[in-house]
Image: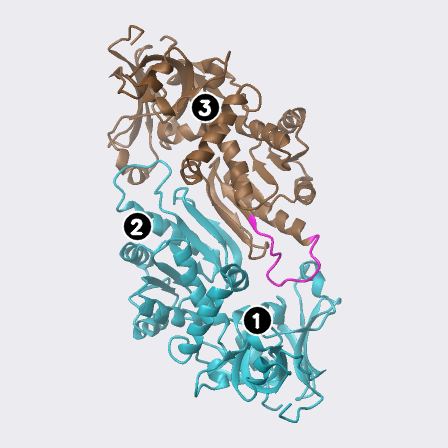
Chain colours: A brown, B cyan
Amino acid sequence: MTTDLPDSALELRSTVTSHGTLELSLQDVPVPTPAANEVVVRVEASPINPSDLGVLIAGADMTTATVEGTPERPVVTASLGEGALAGLSARVDKPLPVGNEGAGTVVAAGSSAAAQALLGTTVGIAGGAMYSRYRAVDASACLVLPEGATARDGASSFVNPLTALGMLETMRREDHSGLVHTAAASNLGQMLVKLCQKDGVPLVNVVRKAEQEELLRSLGAVHVCNSSSASFSADLVEALKATSATLAFDATGGGTLASQLLNGMEEAANSTAAEYSRYGSTVHKQVYIYGGLDTGPTMLTRNFGMAWGVGGWLLTPFLQNAGAATVGRLRARVASELTTTFASTYTREVSLAGMLAPEAFNAYVKRATGEKFLVTPQTLP
Amino acid sequence: MTTDLPDSALELRSTVTSHGTLELSLQDVPVPTPAANEVVVRVEASPINPSDLGVLIAGADMTTATVEGTPERPVVTASLGEGALAGLSARVDKPLPVGNEGAGTVVAAGSSAAAQALLGTTVGIAGGAMYSRYRAVDASACLVLPEGATARDGASSFVNPLTALGMLETMRREDHSGLVHTAAASNLGQMLVKLCQKDGVPLVNVVRKAEQEELLRSLGAVHVCNSSSASFSADLVEALKATSATLAFDATGGGTLASQLLNGMEEAANSTAAEYSRYGSTVHKQVYIYGGLDTGPTMLTRNFGMAWGVGGWLLTPFLQNAGAATVGRLRARVASELTTTFASTYTREVSLAGMLAPEAFNAYVKRATGEKFLVTPQTLP
């Protein structure tokens, strides 16, 4: 150990109670002692990603939230929906840590050479419980940030960059040559624009607002379709024809967008087909739903032939299937392009206690594109 | 040639006209002369499969059908729906032959040894234009029927048997260990019951009527769930738990059944899961839609986690991907079990002209489970 560490430090916990409520609180937990190949990271920055909100909020109705406790130790209580407990039974009355990824300084290290080598470096880490002051992780799990990069730069080194890279890997593996991305003005979407540009991959961006269209065009995006525009359907088909994109990653999930994408891809495929095929085009059209901004039903109007698929896509199983060599290659790319291709922007910073203030949670539960929170666990209170 | 063949013979044609109508008629077409490796089959029996109706009817509204012409040469005319021509442009004013498969006697053969060896045999064939008196096919495409099997026995040697076998192959390839089948009382469904029994594969059958449930139980089916029963939801989950079936083949397509299957599979998977997973079970759940009995939208209520897929499944691309060795193995199995596992039953026989009579087409366009037509092209008129 090179730094005097406290015995215990704050960590955010989310509890679904047997009374049908969600409780968010800060707890004092022991600061870990690193095992031989572990390091302890002082977490300095951690994003609130849409993928964190499932564990954090558990589907509770945050309009019912009340805040008690003290400014240093607020306690938020909110109602879960009718019947929600059934689906949450495995976590009832268990205070769960939250936060998928973050970055900070290695302040303690186990005895192994690999762990010792990291002492004092700024690293990006992932694996949960990042809304916390100190976190022990395996040395091999650390992404050493490039020279000059701060914890803020490295806070989002995993989820968004690896998701963007995973989309491209999936495209190549499944023999597609172009991509469609919805909710495309997100931090992830902006990375994907830069990445596809760099790799020469045609990309159709679907956004919901004119200012999002402008933002993506300012990054150099060629095909941007605004779903609130009157010409959206036609614009989408034109973009699909121009790109021959047959794989979409959809963050919305519910509604008719997935169906519209498949039908547009089919129309684009048939526009170049020479003869009548009773089962539609033989071009395989795929939509992966990787988010659930719209939790309503997915409605598929099947005018897109028989060569199609819709399914769920998640980063973790993708990485597991991809294998260590591929993951290593992707991580190396993230490190080398961290402050360019994979740069993230945050609109607000909050402390751990700040996460539990109404003006914060009322904003981040909205998952609004363009609004992005960074948690700074070392900030007081 | 060993038989005196006519110069021309009848063939059924389906035409989508530029006036927005469907026209069904019989045409005199030249009887083919076989190339070196071809044989000419006198088609004696050919089923009307759901998969034939797309080309035959082209989505026309058969309640508007009128029949003119003569008893030997009826001509059926029916209206296509509003705007239907756009999707059918590639076949407008082209009289298309119809009929995916059939069986009959080899009455002429080309010069090759393989073709000559087939002379006089009864064979099952596939490849379209079977609603016809004579059909030339490559010798290698013929399935020689086992000793004693008639053309009626062999009429359905391809589509249903290979589809049933294809479902099992797909299950094994994609690492599932049990199947679900909807519209399970069909000829195909009955084959699948026998096949799964023989191969020891757990199968959940979904039917819509009590008599269909009885029929399948009489064949030895263990898990039969009747979707019109009040206890269907609970019955389905119990069957999914008992079988651990995570792959479904759905012939209905539209509505909420695919969603219900995925949610049931998820419930079954979670019933044995030890800990809370925010993204649902990690068990991959798949529904392949291979038919469209319900042409309405597919509505997916996504309470089944992220490890799922829904997609189209078709026999022809499956066989293309499976490769020649697999296809050969499957065909050999069909031949050896043609009158047992793969036996088909027909409720009505019609001649080519008989197909164009209202009492026939009003019945077969319904795709009613349990009603199955056999076309006997040699029957007059």
- Residue A150, how many percent across, how many down? 48, 13
- Residue A213, how many percent across, how many down? 65, 29
Give the alpha-carbon distance from disc 2 to disc 3, as whole Å. 34 Å
Q: Which mark is residue B52?
A: 1
Asked whether residue B43 is in view, the answer is no
Residue depth check, mark 1 versus mark 3: number of the one nearer the observer: 1
**Could you tell me which residue is drawn at 35 percent across and 51 percent down?**
B265
**Could you tell me which residue is drawn at 44 percent across and 54 percent down?**
B287
Q: What residue type is labelled 1?
A: Asp
Label 1 crowd bin: few (<14), some (14–19), many (20+), radius 10 Å: some
Q: Main secondary structure of the magenta part?
A: loop
Give the alpha-carbon distance from disc 2 to disc 1, as whole Å. 37 Å
Same subunit, tags 2 and 3: no
Figure quadrant of the N terminus of chain B: bottom right
Q: Which amino acid does label 3 sit on?
A: Tyr
Q: Name the residue under label 2.
A: B268
Q: Name the residue under label 3.
A: A364
Q: What residue type is labelled 2?
A: Ala
Asked whether residue B107 is in view, the answer is yes
User: Do the CB atoms of the residues marked 2 and 3 lie less than 8 Å apart?
Assistant: no
